[in-house]
Amino acid sequence: MYEQSSQLSFQKLSKDTIEQRQKVADLEKQIAFLHNEIEDSTFFIKTLNKKINALRNSIQTRNFLGNLPLEYCPECLTKIKFNEVQSLCKLCKEPIDKSYGVMQAKRMELEIGFQINESQKLVEINKKNSFGI
């Protein structure tokens, strides 16, 4: 009788140990998943910050080049005829909207800024969740 109850206790302990190991394995998987999510989000945020810097550089370049006086055509090097209408391209004489590119870039900058904010919130949530496990 003693042996049978000892054997039953051992089986119960063995079963409990297996269940606990499974719980630990599941928690380790969750932690690894959250860690990967945090790394991915952090990389995504860095990429978005680089895009914002590129957009800002693009705006500055456009502003600089838009004010650059061109006297000669960059293609054929002939003297460019003076254009009295400021809303026409100096080279091809087509109508241009100087604010369009800048406005579009600023809108993209705002959208990317929103994505950065949302991604940072997700990182914080994932960090809290990983610490709570």
Image (cartoon, rainbow, N blue to C red):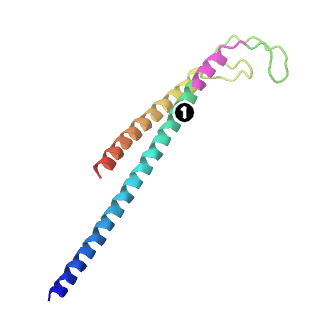
Q: Which residues are magenta?
A: 57-69
Closer-to-camera residue (111/75): 111
> In the image, residue 59 lies at what x, y percent?
58, 23
Closer-to-camera residue (114/128): 128
- What residue appears at the point 19 percent right and 82 percent down from the top-left corner? 6
Is the residue marked by circle 1 packed among few (<14), some (14-19), or many (20+) residues within 10 Å? few
Q: Is residue 89 covered in magenta?
A: no
Up-down relation of residue 108 to residue 132 (above or below)? above
Quarter where residue 89 is shown: top right
Q: Is residue 58 covered in magenta?
A: yes
What residue is shown with label 1?
50
Amino acid of disc 1:
Lys
> In the image, residue 82 lies at what x, y percent?
75, 11
- What residue appears at the point 36 percent right and 63 percent down from the top-left corner? 25
Up-down relation of residue 101 to residue 90 (above or below)? below
Left or right position of 120 against 4: right
